[in-house]
Image: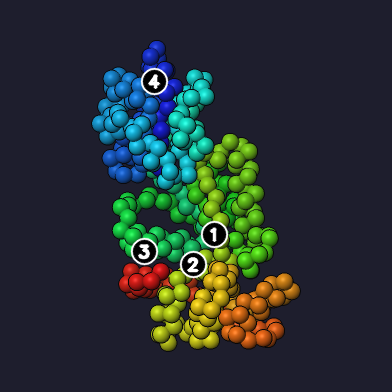
Amino acid sequence: MFVYIDKTVGIYLQNNKLLQWQLDIFDNLAYGIRNGTCIVRGNRDSLMLLGRNSYLNRVNYIGISQEVDLLMLAEYVNRVFVIGFEVLAESDSVPQCIVNKVSYIYLDEKYKYLNDGCTFEACSLVCEDLNDIAFLKILCRSYIGKYHINSYEANFSCDQGGGERTGEVFRLKVVDENKFSLCIVDSDKKYEYQKEYGQTCRLACEVYEQLKVQGLHGKCELYILACHEIENMTPLSIVNEMAKEKKYKLEPQVVRLLNSIKEFGDPKPLLYFDIKNGTNKIKDEQCREYWDCVINNALKSNRKDISFPGFGNHFLQKVISNSGVYFLSTPKA
């Protein structure tokens, strides 16, 4: 989490004292910095006054010369939470390099989710089910290990939406429980050029738009995976390793097809292949034409209504149960 303390805090402190709940916010910021859960930068005068008045007795954790690296840090984040006073806000209250990424946390009104150290750190991760969450955590650990990224253990409270209820669970976490929330859903598109998202994704989008209208977008985010379902994010190298073991019962013809698509055609269709059901249940004419074309290009054939089975409904569970073996030891992602 990236937090910026703007110039209005310094202006306010010239003639006023902070209330206890406002002091708690800065204590929580210092706690977050010490534990690696947030990065804090700020206006030089605001930080100096906070330290001088003992409002931020841990000011050394933040430092004073913060403007130097702000431009560099701003390049790596999509959102910056700015703490300040709305009544004193001016056009130049925040640096230009972060102005398009700002979500304001005004000290004019009490923010419950910044009052307590635990709720300040916790972010609710909302997905369709717990297997999705487990799989995403595995991908993160694998990516961090592969690229030797310095990281910390994110404090997520994980919540499953249950299909079409995912959007409503997202709303519940943001509105009723007042939590910072990240909702991740797959697109459920059956082929690359399909215009409409699936029902779960559409409902989640509607909820997110409503939250933005209510001015709550500063503490929530919706991310749509550019794939049919989360199973499509499984690296093909992992599928190939699993196919070597009979206990997983992966159809050899499907494994060969997926490898042929990647080797002889455009690999993008791999993101939309129905891992669970294959191409057996396609009824939409445009979808059928798309997959006939993809498969014929991959197999160098000229057939119609080509049917391939999938790996079944338990494929993701099989991947999760053996994540330590495959994700952490397989060199190719």
Q: Which amino acid does label 4 sit on?
A: Gly
**Quadrant where the image shows the N terminus:** top left
Mark closest to the chain's N terminus, 2 or 4? 4
Q: Which amino acid does label 1 sit on?
A: Leu
Mark closest to the chain's N terminus, 3 or 1? 3
- Residue 116 on image: x %, y %: 39, 36
Per the image, the residue denoted by label 3 is 142
Above or below, comparing residue 316 to residue 147 in the picture: below
- Residue 254 on image: x %, y %: 54, 83
Q: Label 1 vs label 4: CA separation?
A: 41 Å
Q: Label 2 vs label 4: CA separation?
A: 47 Å
Q: Label 4 vs label 3: CA separation?
A: 43 Å
Residue 323 visible? The answer is: no
Q: Residue at x 52, y 81 (%)?
A: 260
Per the image, the residue denoted by label 1 is 225
Q: Do the residues labelled 1 and 2 touch (CB within 8 Å)?
A: yes
Q: Nearer the viewer, residue 294 or 8?
A: 294
Q: Which of 91 and 272 is in front in this view?
A: 91
Q: Which amino acid does label 3 sit on?
A: Ser
Q: Residue at x 40, y 79 (%)?
A: 241
Q: Label 1 vs label 2: CA separation?
A: 9 Å
Q: Nearer the viewer, residue 248 or 253?
A: 253
Q: Label 3 vs label 1: CA separation?
A: 18 Å
